[in-house]
Image: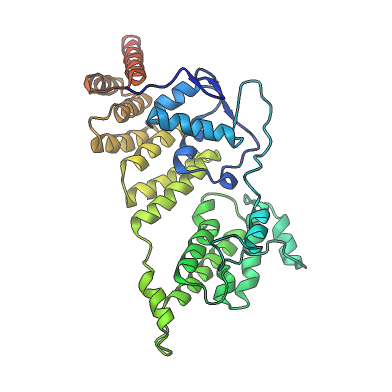
Amino acid sequence: MSTVPAEIAGIGPTSLKLRVSPGFDPLKAAVGPDEYFLLSRIDGLISIREVLLNSGLAPERGVAIVTRLRSIGALLLPGETGTPAPASVPTAPARALRTAQGTPGQAHEMPHDLRLPNPTPEELAALAEEAEIDETDRRRILVLERMMLREDPYMLLGVSQGADAKALKRAYFLLSKEIHPDRYYGKRLGSFATRMSRVFEETSRAYARLTTPDKSRGSAAHSAVHTNEQPQTPQEYATELYDRACQLEVGGDAMGAMKLFAACVRMDPQIKFLRRAASCALAAGQPRSAVEYAKKAHSLAPNDASSARLLAAAFRAAGKLSDAEEVLVMAMAMKNENDSLSSELRNDLAEVRRMLANP
């Protein structure tokens, strides 16, 4: 039987209301989707116990995530005013320098130098313009624009001449995530909206050029690259959209995240994506969308009490108290070994019935 513990080692009681450190950057810390999800639910207003119960994750998994988030400086205890950036997460320039000096297993990677020497007046104006894009990404786009003029696909992707298929694929997909226009969906980008789109298209062409066989030369190496490379599947792209939506949600752009979640679940309506989309819709004050996503998630796992509780929360937010009551009653009848979740379901049902009795 698995329940949320009363205390987490190194943190304290799960009744504590933790909050996210203002200086924490989840992108630089490379946190995963489940970690993004929990991080987005922590706001200093509800207890860690409630966050874990509402997450739908196994308690052990949730506790492990909270422990890790605390260890990398993401979470503050009540009364704490700030946490220094974790030493284990290097900045983008530091990572680039370290790799350039020779990181084992990455011999073909040649990271772009983001220092932008001798910037032109146009580049200086771009760095200073009003736009919702950080300086590191501004420099990356401007550096890639310079490289486009040299018409060297290897340099544009950041790999050495003759890089193998694995190195090419790794470089392309890592770079495409950094510069994909969807990453800043709904943001004010100024001139970088056009710049980013142009750079992304040119980078994609460079990758295609290096992974398409050259029939005129009959290159065996090019043929091998082409044979080994597979186009990105809809499921893979849906996962990318999901990750970007999580980033937007953690960053406070719930409506922008909603748009990406919508595209994600259209492509691959798996339960994990649907539940996260429903939770985001609730946080964004979009109960109708929350009901739609929660219904689909519940249909995929009709005997899952956590999914039922999420659907009831969506019905309640939409003002459909009778529907919420019905779902909670059915959830109470489901087999459930999580005593904490059972207790929360009883509390939810009691609250819904109180609201029905006092409209």
Location of the C terminus (image quadrant): top left
Residue 213 in view here: no
Which quadrant would the N terminus be assigned to in this image? top left
Q: Residue at x 52, y 69 (%)?
A: 203
Instruction: Give residue 190's quadrant in the image.
Output: bottom right
79 lies above or below 238: above
The picture places residue 121, in percent across and down from the top left corner, at 76, 66
Residue at the location (40% across, 24% down)? 53
From the top left corner, tell me how far across and down residue 10 is, in percent: 56, 25
Q: Residue at x 54, y 22 (%)?
A: 45
Is residue 241 visible in the rendered structure shown here?
yes
In the picture, measured across the screen, residue 208 lies left or right of residue 227, that is right
Q: Residue furthest front?
A: 104
Query: In this orientation, which residue lies closer to the viewer: 9 or 232?
Result: 9
In the foreground, 15 or 205? 15
Q: Is residue 258 left or right of residue 148?
A: left
Q: Position of residue 336 (x, y in %)?
A: 27, 23
53 above or below 291?
Answer: above
In this picture, residue 99 sits left or right of residue 300? right
